[in-house]
Amino acid sequence: MNRQARGRRVLLAMACLSLLPVLAAWGVFRFSPALAQHSYGQLLPAEPFAAAALPGWPRGVWSLVSVEPGTCDAACMARRFLLRQIRLAQGEAAARMVTVRLAGDAAASPASGLALSAPALASRLAHDGIFLVDPHGNQVLFYPDGSDPSRVINEINRVVQINNAL
């Protein structure tokens, strides 16, 4: 075998070895179902939350928002309880989070957290779940009533920790 043919084979082998990790990474990314992770909550379009322009809206903190169009029934009370539990379960990040209730009637019933009266907004927003709003006032996620509390807590914890700089 001559030197020129041997040199070509060595060059071809080096090229194949350098392409192998790239092709392996592409194959794992493309065909691995284990990497397909989806959000538990409904991911909302990246736009300002409708109520973030209200006077008294908390700035610089994560907001867990519940919309209460009228009187608070059993589902509303369960949602309020879940809001408190989600916030408390965040540990150190709980100081960076506040619960907000958008009341549809002028007289908001007393409860923990911030209560804002916004009848026009409360009628337009979904009132059967919880919104997560970032510190800049942008909507992030929506969790409908009946969502698994532990999965909601874990996902919100992960979102808040990943976005620690906000």
Image (spheres, grey):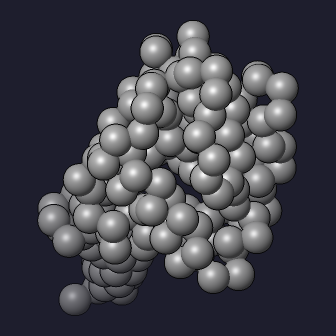
Furthest residue to the top? 120
* Residue at position x 83%, y 34% in the image: 56
**Residue 119 lies in quadrant:** top right
Q: Would you say residue 18 is visible in this rendering?
A: yes
* Residue at position x 23%, y 53% in the image: 146
Q: Position of residue 92 (x, y in %)?
A: 70, 81
Quadrant in which the C terminus appears: bottom right
Q: Is residue 103 left or right of residue 80?
A: right
Residue 103 against residue 16 in the figure, above or below: above
Front in this rendered view, residue 117 or 65: 117
Q: Would you say residue 156 is visible in this rendering?
A: no
Residue 44 against residue 144 in the figure, above or below: above
* Residue at position x 33%, y 36% in the image: 128
* Residue at position x 57%, y 30% in the image: 103
Quadrant in which the N terminus appears: bottom left
Q: Position of residue 114 (x, y in %)?
A: 71, 46
Q: Position of residue 23 (x, y in %)?
A: 29, 66
